[in-house]
Amino acid sequence: MKSHFIPFSLCLILGVWASSGAGGRLRADPGTSYTHFYAAPASGTAGNGVLSVDVHFYLWIPKVRTLRGVIVHQHGCGNGAELGGVTAAQDLHWRALAEKWNCALLGSSYRAGDGRDCALWCDPRNGSDAAFQRALADLADESGHAELTRVPWCLWGHSGGGIWSNLMLLLHPDRVVAAWLRSGTVSGAPVERWHPPERTPAALQVPVMANPGEKEKNHERFHGAWAGSMRMMEDWNAQAGWVGVAVDPKTAHECGDSRYLAIRFFDACLKQRLPSKLGSPLRRMNSSIGRLGNAQTREISRMPPSGAAIPHLSRLPDAEFARAWSEFIEFGYIRDTTAPSPPERVRVERSPTGGMELRWSAVADLESGLGGFEIERNGVVSATLPQKPNSKYGRPLIQGMTYHDTPADPVTEFHWPISDEDARSARFRIRSLNTSGLRSRPVLVTGL
């Protein structure tokens, strides 16, 4: 398999220039992005351990000295999902989680396309496991973060990506912090086709959340995703596995607003499991602070002694996550009462075209994401970004949202044109907005 390395800091993904209203341009925010492309050998066939499809990997690394983990955002099957995976590592909301825990964020684009068997890649034993780990090694060399080959992984997967994440957990349980399986588990696929590895005691200790959509239950095409989630819950629970199910009451196979619970899940699991010293084993989940969730009654209770089976109940990392889980499975969203962080480095600068503009940067609210900005001129709101939200699926994020939980517009730097006169005399303030409609404190724009 041929490999091509393309570092990109302040460059465009696949040459695409994305914008969100007049104020957004595609540039790298603090941190550095890299990509690796691997061309498949023409002789590769599924089942022999050689990846027989092309793949792009996209990695974002925050400005940290040492990484503690990698958050993997794995797309599903089909051309649309594969293209959606291109922007996964550009997601400001997922980057906020990665930055909090000194983790890298990794997306991919396996190019099987429509009409081909996606088991060519979503079964890791067909070469994608080896390609994934090779990419981490190559990216470690290029980034100077040698620890990329040793740090543990958080695995998020949608549909076929959920199957991939499920199988990777079974193959490498000692490397997985936690797994979120959105509408895809190996339990929903025929055993005679997938032949999943044995569930070892180590695999059963990895916290897993299956996340089907309620409308998948009787869906002609996607009912298997629902059945597989429920079967996984039953099978893993019978062996006292740390597993839960969070049904999304508003969706079918699309990801919807599931990220607001998934990010909280990984946040709670990273807090409990990441070792304090690089190279040390992952810590076990803490049953003393864990909770059980009853999806029928939404009742939350304390965890039983380790090793006890809890049929039909979800194991949840802690009380705070349990409250969010209970709200999500009832309403399909999670309320947020905390204001987002204000914009940073707000200023007036001369634009490349010679005019004047406001410029600023921002980080996403971990609980509710980054919805946009309000610009005040002399105490009156004069502009809102984005002007027209581009979120067909889920709540309106500044970057928009696709079916696949990836950005529609990977905007990472923000600016707004103003007149020369306003630059000299007007008083501007900018607020961040999260997707719950909450506003940050305003930040006064400083002049030239």
Image (spheres, rainbow, N blue to C red):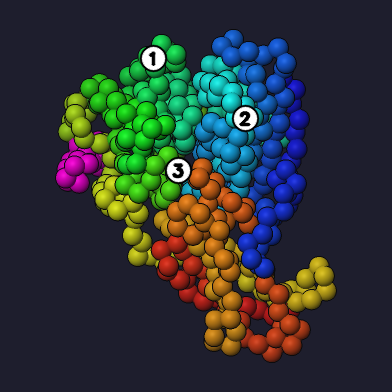
**Which part of the image, by quadrant, shows the C terminus?**
bottom right
Residue sitting at x 83%, y 74%: 354
Q: Is residue 155 above or below residue 11?
A: above
Q: Which residue is mark 1?
A: 191
Q: Examine the structure image and report whether residue 288 is included in the region drawn in magenta.
A: yes
Q: Which disc, if any, is residue 40?
A: none
Mark closest to the chain's N terminus, 1 or 3: 1
Measured in 3D between alpha carbons, the distance from the residue under mark 2 to the one under mark 1, in whole angstroms, is 24 Å
Asked if labels 3 and 1 touch by Cβ distance under 8 angstroms, the answer is no
| C-alpha gap between disc 3 and disc 2 | 18 Å
Task: Report x, y in % for residue 18.
Answer: 68, 55
Q: Amino acid at mark 1?
A: Val
| Residue picked out by circle 3 | 254
Which region of the structure is painted magenta? 285-303
| Residue drawn at point x = 72 percent, y = 24 percent | 39
Q: Is 298 placed left or right of 362 in the picture?
A: left
Query: Relative to 291, is 220 on the left or the right?
Result: right
- The crowding category of the residue bearing disc 2, from other C-alpha atoms within 10 Å (few below 14, some 14 to 19, many at least 20), is some
Q: Specify whether residue 300 is in view.
A: no
Res 113 label: 2
- Please state the horizontal and vertical placement of residue 10, each as a whole percent of the image: 73, 52
